[in-house]
Amino acid sequence: MELKFVPGVGPKRAELFASEIHVTTDEELLSYFPYRYVDKSKVYRICDIQGEMPYVLLRGKFSVFEELGAGTRGHRYKGLFSDGTGVVECVWFNGLRYIKDSVHKGEEYLLFGQPKESEYNHSVQIVHPELEPAVKNGVDAQQSLMGMYSTTEKMKKCMLNSKAIQRIILGYLQRNLAPFPETLPAYIVDQLHLVNYNKAIRQIHFPPDPEALQKAQVRLKFEELFYLQLYLIRSFKMRQQANRGFVFSRIGDYFNDFYFHHLPFELTGAQKRVLKEIRADMGSGKQMNRLLQGDVGSGKTMVALLTMLMALDNDYQACLMAPTEILATQHYESLSAQLEGTGIKVALLKGSTRKKERDRIHAALADGTLQILIGTHALLEPDVKFRNLGVVVIDEQHRFGVEQRSKLWLKNVQPPHVLVMTATPIPRTLAMTVYGDLDVSVIDELPPGRKPIMTIHRWDQQREGLIRAMRKQLDAGRQIYVVYPLIEENEKLKYRDVEQGFENMQAAFGPEYSVVMVHGKMKPADKDAAMQRFVSGQAQIMVATTVIEVGVNVPNASVMVIESAERFGLSQLHQLRGRVGRGAEQSYCVLVTGYSLSPVTRKRIDIMCETTDGFQIAEADMALRGPGDLEGTQQSGLAFDLRIASLAKDGQLLQMARNIAKDILDKDPLLEAPQNNILRRRLQTLFAHRMDWSRIS
């Protein structure tokens, strides 16, 4: 049923529901769950309220009402509310006529709101409190648990606050007393001892007690995660059946010659394990779609090179796509140097590649003499045609949309094997969901000889000591990154900006040492020239914004100074830190902050100083701020917004849901068994709006 037909909504409110919180039907309204619950069993005394407190429930009467500022922007309605132990000032800026008509002096009310200290007279003030008569139809109106619903400013201005949403849902449930149909097969409900859907959906909105609420939450969280996993695993299985893969049966001269005579260092155990997984994929007759995770410096590129050599041994070509020209160039220079003397032909294709060189590359690709092509988005152009493309490697894959990646499939009659790499550690629960239809490999060891980066926290006021420590590193021949969060000064935020930082570094270290600046607003040519000066060693200090987060490899850089580190998330801090520690020398990351840190920010800084394990950091980051819309997740497979489950908190439930979904699909891949009809229908309902990217990595 369209939402406008639900009593209490109507066309105007329905438009607000749709535009502000994307709720358009009665079913979506029922799935708009409270984001938290407030215990309304405890009534506070006004005399016990101290300064800022969370939401409180008060019981009392209004003694005075006053309208102020009529005809001005400050127009408001004020009332004094007392319970005999003290007085609270209540203020309304919106819906004044309704309050004047419906709230009366001398009657007893239950008042619910968040007390704050008034800026003017230091009295306790509650803005836009929720009110209801203390006694309704002769019955005490006090309840124990009340759900709080997320709203927006626009909704509140139209009197659609949390209480209004609660009333609409209550009215809907009271009019629909017949049980809502079950959405899971009976065998799952019985196996897991879940409450039925009808009970869960009613008690999630109006829980009679904490135990009933917990049971309703478990039921609905499981269902949400279960259908997500069922969708992802089914997509994965369907793609595997639909797409045959090239069979790479040989490990031949290219691989063996490089492995035994050109490999610059012994592979780690993790690299060997991942290569075995890749080799099994590419010899199975099924198309490989594998995500390779590993911290910066863990050796993903070496695994990618050996994977490409497997393709060459079986008379196929390979390509590697990177998100920026600088990163593509670095891959080309690195792989060309490693493959020197092997006779393997490698080329680089960028947007800026000249026509003459481009034509030469196109011809060599078409006749098969060019074996490995490295490039940027330029690889996706229609005139880039391979003779026989067998493997595609995509670096920092979250920088590419699914639609862009799908263009690589058109480069061959049969889809090539795909290896996507990321240095952004992804928590296990998120990887199961975001990349649930990919196989995931993890490199969780650093190459021998690498020293862990030392991470230090310094306050703004300790800058003189920091400058001395930086000079010591520069005098020893090292290079330094200094990263700032903003490009131009913002008075409101008062964070050091990159241009001011550039001047400060020049003043502190020039003319003895050369300083370059890089930020996203520079012309690409100027940015590349500045980066090249740092990469070549002509400049010793790079002052930059986060444009260097991905794509600069300077083994001689041993210090990363991050200014206003409180402005960065954990994953971003970890990515920036990974720019150093690439050589044999001891490297340092210095997090510089102001003194006023929130508890969450303080926790972030402490975690960074305690560990360099990217996966530990990713788990902590998700626990602190939730999964959010991580870069690329909307395109990488997060099938729908989670309405009640949390990937940060419900890992065990997710694993259980995944195991059960996998068992069902192993026995009944097409969900044709009578007991699974409900699953097939529900999947179609939930995912009808999804474009089918399931065939694409």
Image (cartoon, rainbow, N blue to C red):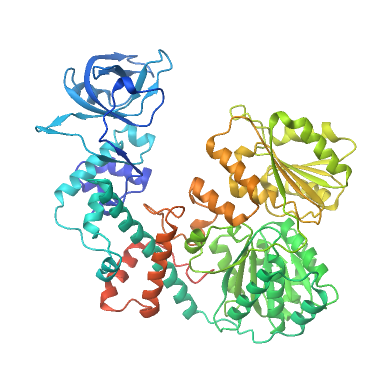
Of residues 136 and 449, the one drawn nearer to the viewer in this rendering? 449
Image: 232 above or below 21: below
Of residues 173 and 199, the one drawn nearer to the viewer in this rendering? 199
Residue 373 horizontal/vertical position (percent): 72, 70
Q: Residue at x 27, y 50 (%)?
A: 211
Q: Is residue 92 visible?
A: no
Q: Residue at x 18, y 29 (%)?
A: 134
Residue 244 horizontal/vertical position (percent): 53, 82
Image: 76 above or below 312: above
Of residues 146 and 90, the one drawn nearer to the viewer in this rendering? 146
Q: Residue at x 68, y 76 (%)?
A: 386
**Image quadrant of residue 109?**
top left
**Image quadrant of residue 54?**
top left
Determine whether, in the image, residue 143 is placed left or right of residue 20.
left
Q: Residue at x 36, y 19 (%)?
A: 124
Screen quadrant of the C terminus: bottom right
Residue furthest to the left in view is: 138
